[in-house]
Image (tube, grey):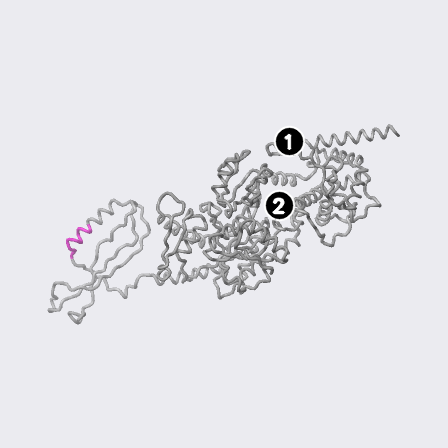
């Protein structure tokens, strides 16, 4: 027996050493991350007791439920939603990470407990099984080393009980883990996971970091200078990334992208500590920029969900100079409102107003929202397109069930149906606000049921009524990619990839009334919001307020050519983009606009009948034998024939035009008497005819038309 005991101790030491060696062999694509990750494993010494309690509560709600005939480990009742209390942001993050890791390795951890005969245990009730599984994962992650106890923390009896129990069986647990690795032929426990989960984790760990610049506190140029002083190099695209590099996002001019390996170093910079740079997923920046591009000077905006305070702050920063107010719905408690006000105050945001009602509880005629022209709707969604689920849950106050759905790779039909119905109700409620002119709808879902189908059903519902202009889909416009392919699509979609998370973006704008004309001021205001004027400030003089609107500009930190050509270009681009938006309708939503197309066709036929030339009955008949041409006419004919000879064989389609000149008195006398005749000249020409050189061709030869005989020689007397 003593010999067997010594062999057991030796086996325990060998298993621990073997586990340590295998843990250091983890594979990663990031440069230098292997050494860094090994050091992190060695330095791990456990968490506070409160972290284990919160992680166990989260895991209890997201764990994988098995069929009754396969249940070997009992977890107790989880019908009651757990009450989570976190000391700080770090405790919240590590609690979710620990619960997510326990979920990913749930089958392995249960197998270790059963194989080592540690479970079942009479002294541990089923209600503490989740805590047992969570602490077992952390114990093997620390290579079965003892946890460091913090003096300042308050001990939790359940945590100390489970910890002592696992520590007493650590040899058996380590041996069971080694047998599981041998069984699965895995170098480490990461290789026991399904391949899809491993790829998703690798993609999430290598996902570039997106940060936006808080221009309340610092300008873009100062950020570039500061980063250059700290050794960062600016490159063109993500594909050019090296160690200390970054690039400007192709869609949002105030968003910078960094390699994922620099996360810890970036968060330690003064730029982040002073809220000058803020880390957030790119999908939210896309939604905010799309909403800003639709605002005119003085327009308010409604944010339907509180979501992330970073999204609201970003919206405030972009509307700093437009005198717009941001109304945020759903701030229920006064404590939450005070917390948000403190956060916004630290960031320098001042134009934010908090509403305690939920968005669907606010009426469309609420007097507070009568100046709101744009509505930003970021509904709760399945979120399977996000790259980092932990960050998404923490920033967006999302459901922890996303971790289970992401691990399974899909969402249940019941949950998807509930989410889609809620999203449709919120979008239809948004369409009832008569003063609102545009709605920005954005999700992080990969399901059409939450994206295209929701938008299609909302457009077909007709909830906006007949007294206002109906909504139609318009392509989103971003300030830095006006000519990109994505800017001409009705829906903006990004699939999850190695360089970005996925998102879906749709913009619903009211159709413009035919009698309504957009003023030059509004066009220039929108152009300035999209970054087309490069810092120019549009002003209006006092005299112009009384007369017709006339826009004057001044130059602000600009060198180069004059302002007038740029403004003309902006106005032309605005017109072209409007035409494209009206013409471009994809096949996916062609059924939605079928009724509008039929109505438009009838209008076109009516317009054609109106603009047709005057009928032949109303015009004087042309004489069969025209009078001889004058010398001027002959010269004009020769010039015309010469130009026709030089023209290319290709011609554009021409439109006939007839010009009737007023009657004049001819100098000759009629053979029947002394009554003079009045002749009318009708020129038959071609409007818009151009040769290959681009010059307008002259009209052909003039013809004399026989006029009616006047009863009075001087009818004007």
Q: Secondary structure at mark 2?
A: helix
x%, y% of residue 366? 54, 64
What are the residue bounds of the magenta stretch? Answer: 628-637
Give the residue displayed 27% in from the left and 50% down from the top: 696
Judge left or right: residue 189 versus residue 682: right
Disc on the earlier residue, 2 or 1: 1
Give the residue displayed 79% in from the left and 40% down from the top: 166
Judging by the rendered image, the residue that carries numbered circle 1 is 35
Q: Mark 1 Cα within 10 Å, few/some/many (few <14, many 20+)?
A: few
x%, y% of residue 16? 75, 32
Q: Residue furthest right?
A: 1
Report which quarter residue 704 is drawn in. bottom left
Judging by the rendered image, the residue that carries numbered circle 2 is 391
Q: Residue furthest top?
A: 3
Which of 413/221 is in front?
Answer: 221
Which of 309/30 is in front?
Answer: 309
């Amino acid at each position: 027996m003593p010999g067997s005991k010594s062999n057991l101790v030796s086996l325990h030491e060998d298993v621990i050493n073997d586990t340590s060696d295998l843990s250091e062999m983890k594979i990663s694509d990031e440069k230098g991350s292997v050494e860094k990750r090994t050091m992190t494993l060695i330095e791990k010494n456990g968490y506070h007791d409160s972290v284990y309690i919160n992680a166990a509560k989260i895991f209890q709600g997201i764990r994988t439920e098995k069929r009754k005939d396969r249940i070997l480990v009992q977890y107790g009742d989880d019908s009651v939603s757990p009450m989570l209390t976190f000391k700080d942001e770090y405790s919240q993050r590590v609690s979710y990470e620990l619960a997510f890791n326990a979920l990913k390795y749930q089958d392995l951890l249960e197998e270790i407990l059963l194989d080592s005969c540690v479970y079942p245990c009479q002294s541990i009730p089923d209600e503490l099984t989740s805590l047992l599984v969570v602490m077992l994962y952390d114990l093997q992650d620390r290579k079965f080393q003892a946890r460091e106890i913090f003096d300042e923390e308050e001990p939790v009896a359940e945590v100390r009980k489970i910890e002592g129990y696992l520590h007493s069986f650590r040899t058996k647990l380590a041996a069971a883990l080694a047998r599981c690795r041998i069984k699965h032929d895995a170098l480490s426990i990461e290789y026991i996971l399904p391949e899809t989960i491993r790829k998703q984790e690798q993609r999430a760990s290598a996902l570039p970091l997106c940060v936006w610049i808080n221009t309340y506190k610092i300008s873009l140029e100062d950020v570039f200078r500061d980063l250059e002083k700290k050794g960062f190099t600016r490159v063109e695209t993500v594909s050019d990334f090296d160690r200390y590099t970054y690039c400007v996002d192709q869609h949002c001019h105030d968003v910078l992208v960094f390699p994922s390996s620099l996360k810890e170093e970036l968060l330690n910079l003064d730029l982040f500590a002073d809220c000058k740079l803020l880390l957030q997923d790119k999908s939210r920046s896309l939604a905010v920029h799309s909403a800003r591009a639709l605002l005119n000077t003085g327009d308010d905006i409604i944010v339907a969900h509180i979501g992330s305070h970073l999204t609201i702050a970003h919206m405030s920063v972009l509307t700093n100079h437009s005198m717009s107010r941001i109304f945020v719905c759903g701030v229920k408690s006064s404590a939450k409102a005070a917390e948000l006000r403190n956060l916004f105050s630290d960031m320098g945001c001042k134009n934010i107003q908090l509403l305690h009602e939920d968005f669907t509880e606010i009426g469309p005629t609420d007097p507070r929202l009568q100046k709101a022209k744009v509505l930003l709707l970021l509904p709760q969604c399945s979120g399977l397109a996000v790259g980092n689920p932990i960050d998404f849950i923490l920033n967006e106050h999302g459901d922890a069930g996303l971790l289970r759905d992401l691990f399974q790779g899909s969402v249940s039909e019941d949950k998807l149906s509930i989410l889609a119905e809620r999203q449709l109700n919120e979008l239809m409620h948004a369409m009832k606000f008569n003063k609102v002119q545009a709605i920005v709808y954005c999700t992080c879902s990969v399901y059409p049921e939450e994206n295209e189908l929701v938008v299609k059903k909302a457009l077909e519902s007709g909830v906006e009524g007949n007294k206002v202009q109906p909504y139609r889909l318009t392509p989103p416009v971003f300030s830095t990619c006006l000519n990109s392919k994505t800017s001409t699509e009705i829906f903006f979609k990004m699939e999850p990839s190695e360089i970005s998370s996925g998102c879906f973006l749709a913009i619903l704008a009211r159709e413009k009334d035919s009698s309504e004309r957009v003023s030059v001021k509004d066009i220039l205001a929108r152009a300035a919001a999209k970054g087309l004027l490069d810092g120019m400030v549009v002003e209006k003089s006092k005299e112009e307020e009384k007369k017709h609107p006339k826009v004057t500009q001044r130059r602000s930190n600009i060198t180069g050519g004059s302002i007038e050509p740029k403004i003309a270009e902006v106005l032309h681009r605005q017109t072209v983009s409007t035409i494209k938006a009206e013409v471009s309708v994809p096949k996916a939503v062609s059924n939605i606009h079928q009724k509008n197309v039929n109505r438009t066709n009838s209008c076109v036929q009516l317009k054609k009948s109106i603009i047709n030339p005057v009928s032949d009955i109303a015009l004087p008949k042309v004489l069969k034998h025209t009078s001889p041409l004058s010398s001027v006419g002959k010269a004009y004919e020769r010039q015309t024939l010469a130009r026709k000879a030089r023209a290319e064989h290709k011609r554009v389609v021409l439109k006939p035009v007839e010009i009737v000149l007023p009657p004049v008195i001819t100098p000759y006398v009629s053979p029947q008497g002394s009554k003079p005749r009045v002749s009318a000249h009708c020129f038959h020409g071609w409007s818009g005819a151009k040769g290959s050189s681009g010059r307008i061709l002259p009209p052909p030869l003039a013809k004399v038309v026989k006029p009616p005989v006047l009863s009075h020689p001087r009818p004007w007397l």
